[in-house]
């Protein structure tokens, strides 16, 4: 791994944690729009699956350690691994498509699938194991997180496309 890539990953991790901490937009009970997902989406879009997943997963871990310890972190971090593993390849396949409408539809479908799998399935299952609550209860509680994360990731698509052009100019050897 090159020093430039390690530095870029460190910036992504720090940005994920900083945006998650500093820009909390409440939407439901104790849930908020986690703007750190914009960073994860941009990294998945421009730098690939591994970089996006690392930025999102380690960004969550850093955020949780700074804010509230380990509460909620294992499920959220593993959910982000799944989200990054789905979004990276999906964004990579659609990135070069000429048809903007088809690209957008496919990216939104990938986001819905990734967040459903990562939050409703993986995060809920990890919390089911940790807290011994029925799976249906965990899924019900995570519906709020699913909606909030889904909104941020869908809204981040234009940001991804805009910043990808800048990333290509600034980091041509790292853009995938």
Image (spheres, rainbow, N blue to C red):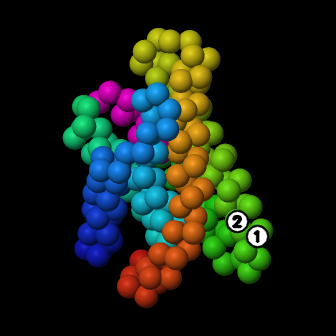
Task: Check if mark 2's residue and mark 1's residue have beta carbons within 8 Å.
Answer: yes
Left or right? Give the position of 50 relative to 11.
right
* Residue located 47% across and 75% down the image: 163
Quadrant in the picture for residue 54: bottom left
Few, some or many residues within 10 Å of mark 2 (<14, 14–19, 20+): some
Which percent across, then down, holds residue 96?
66, 78
Which percent across, then down, holds residue 127?
46, 23
To which residue does mark 1 refer?
101
> What's the magenta bit mostly, secondary-structure-wise?
helix
Q: Is residue 146 visible?
A: yes
* Residue located 43% across and 79% down the image: 167
Which of the image's four quarters has the N terminus?
A: bottom left
To which residue does mark 2 refer?
104
* Residue located 47% across and 11% down the image: 132
Which percent across, then down, holds residue 119?
54, 36
Which residue is more in the foreground, 165 or 144? 144
Q: Which range is magenta?
A: 70-80
Spatial CA distance of label 2 from label 1 is 5 Å
Which percent across, then down, holds residue 115?
59, 44
Few, some or many residues within 10 Å of mark 1 (<14, 14–19, 20+): few
* Residue located 63% across and 39% down the image: 116
């Amino acid at each position: 791994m090159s020093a430039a890539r390690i530095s870029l990953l460190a910036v992504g991790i720090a940005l994920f944690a900083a945006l998650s901490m500093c820009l909390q937009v409440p939407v439901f009970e104790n849930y908020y729009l986690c703007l750190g997902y914009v960073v994860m989406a941009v990294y998945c879009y421009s730098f690939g699956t591994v970089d996006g997943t690392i930025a999102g997963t380690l960004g969550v871990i850093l955020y949780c350690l700074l804010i509230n310890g380990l509460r909620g972190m294992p499920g959220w971090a593993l959910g982000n691994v799944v989200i990054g593993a789905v979004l990276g390849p999906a964004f990579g396949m659609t990135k070069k498509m000429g048809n903007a409408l088809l690209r957008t539809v496919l990216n939104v479908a990938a986001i819905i699938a990734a967040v459903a799998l990562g939050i409703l399935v993986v995060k809920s299952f990890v919390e089911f194991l940790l807290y011994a609550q029925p799976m249906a209860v965990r899924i019900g509680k995570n519906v709020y997180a699913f909606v909030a994360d889904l909104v941020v990731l869908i809204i981040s698509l234009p940001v991804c496309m805009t910043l990808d052009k800048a990333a290509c100019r600034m980091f041509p050897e790292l853009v995938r």
